[in-house]
């Protein structure tokens, strides 16, 4: 049973560029949440997708947007990258009916130069 | 604003020691308290607690939740070098948003 997968593993971008990160949930899971984890900090909630819609959003600017596809996979898009966007981006999936039971993927390390 | 605070922030012990990690929370629409272990990248799920006073155990690890005092602890007995990691605590809402603490860095020396 494959767990949560994310791509790419690492990414280097320059300020002002745009980036797309991808996530495939665990088999049988239909809800995907995205988190940003800065070095030495706990993950911070960006948003959650369920039934192809954004269900909840944390305190992140509109530069952060997402999408969920009919197969439950998800993308995180960040526009106009800032140096402060450098972080580990984690995706978590959860089964139907228990959105707080979250299993995490290995993350994408984004470096903005 | 939701808040989760973990203590201590770091801990150094020797193999065989017992450790207790603390987590206090203030989360609106609270439903669950979750513990994760993070070694390199992916936080690994350890426990999810929703009821007060009921201890959950998995091998040498155990955890309990106090919903009156808004507090949880994670105990690790007979620590091993493989227990070295960052331990994250998170408060979960019924809608699925997790608010994480800063984490406790545990280092276990041989």
Image: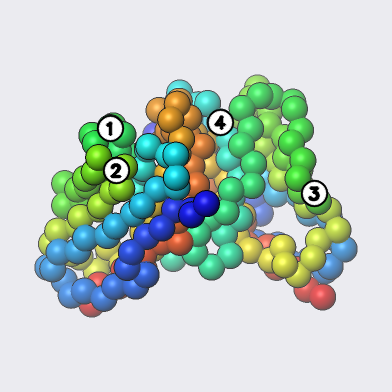
- For discs 4 and 3, the disc positioned in front in the rendered view: 3
Q: Measured along the vertical axis of the image, is residue B48 above or below residue B77? A: above
| Location of the C terminus of chain B (image quadrant) | bottom right
- Give the number of the disc on residue A71: 2
Disc number lying in front (3 or 2): 2
Q: Where in the figure is residue B62, as x and y percent of width and height?
A: 76, 43
- What whole-number distance in Å separates the C-alpha atoms at marks 3 and 1? 37 Å
| Same-chain status of marks 4 and 3 | yes
Q: Secondary structure at mark 3?
A: loop
Q: Nearer the viewer, mark 1 or mark 4?
A: 1
Residue B71 visible: no
Mark 4, Cα crowd under 10 Å, few <14 / some 14-19 / many 20+, is many
Residue position for label 4: B32
Seen in the picture, residue A101 relative to B78 is either above or below; the reply is above
Q: Secondary structure at mark 1?
A: loop
What separation in Å lies between label 3 and label 2 (alpha carbons)? 36 Å
Residue at 76% x, 70% y is B81
Q: Quadrant of residue A108?
A: bottom left
Find out whether the residues at labels 1 and 4 contact each other: C-beta distance under 8 Å.
no
Q: Which residue is mark 1?
A: A51
- Looking at marks 2 and 1 on the same chain, the residue that comes earlier in the sequence is marked by 1
- The residue lying toward the viewer, choosing from B70 and B55, is B55
Which of the 4 image quarters holds residue A82?
bottom left
Horizontal side of B20 relative to A23 (left or right) equals right
Residue A75 horizontal/vertical position (percent): 25, 52
Pointers 2 and 4 in contact (C-beta within 8 Å): no
Question: Chain letter of disc 2?
Answer: A
Residue lying at the far front of the rendered structure: A1
Q: Can you tell which mark lies on residue B59?
A: 3
């Amino acid at each position: 049973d494959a767990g949560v997968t994310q791509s790419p593993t690492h990414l280097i971008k320059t300020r002002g560029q745009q980036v797309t990160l991808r996530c495939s949930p665990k088999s049988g899971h239909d809800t995907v949440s995205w988190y940003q984890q800065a070095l030495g900090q706990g993950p911070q909630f960006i948003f959650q997708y369920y039934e192809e819609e954004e269900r909840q959003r944390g305190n992140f600017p509109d530069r952060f947007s997402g999408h969920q596809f009919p197969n439950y996979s998800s993308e995180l898009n960040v526009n106009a990258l800032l140096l402060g966007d450098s972080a580990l981006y984690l995706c978590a999936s959860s089964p139907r009916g228990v959105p707080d039971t979250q299993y995490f993927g290995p993350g994408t390390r984004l470096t903005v130069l | 604003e939701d808040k989760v605070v973990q203590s201590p922030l770091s801990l150094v012990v020797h193999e065989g020691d017992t450790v207790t990690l603390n987590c206090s929370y203030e989360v609106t629409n609270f439903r669950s308290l979750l513990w994760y272990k993070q070694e390199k990248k992916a936080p690994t799920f350890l426990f999810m607690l929703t009821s007060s006073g009921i201890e959950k155990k998995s091998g040498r690890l155990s955890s309990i939740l106090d919903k009156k005092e808004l507090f949880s602890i994670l105990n690790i007995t007979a620590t091993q070098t493989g227990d070295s990691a960052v331990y994250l605590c998170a408060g979960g809402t019924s809608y699925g948003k997790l608010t994480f603490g800063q984490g406790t860095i545990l280092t276990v020396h041989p």
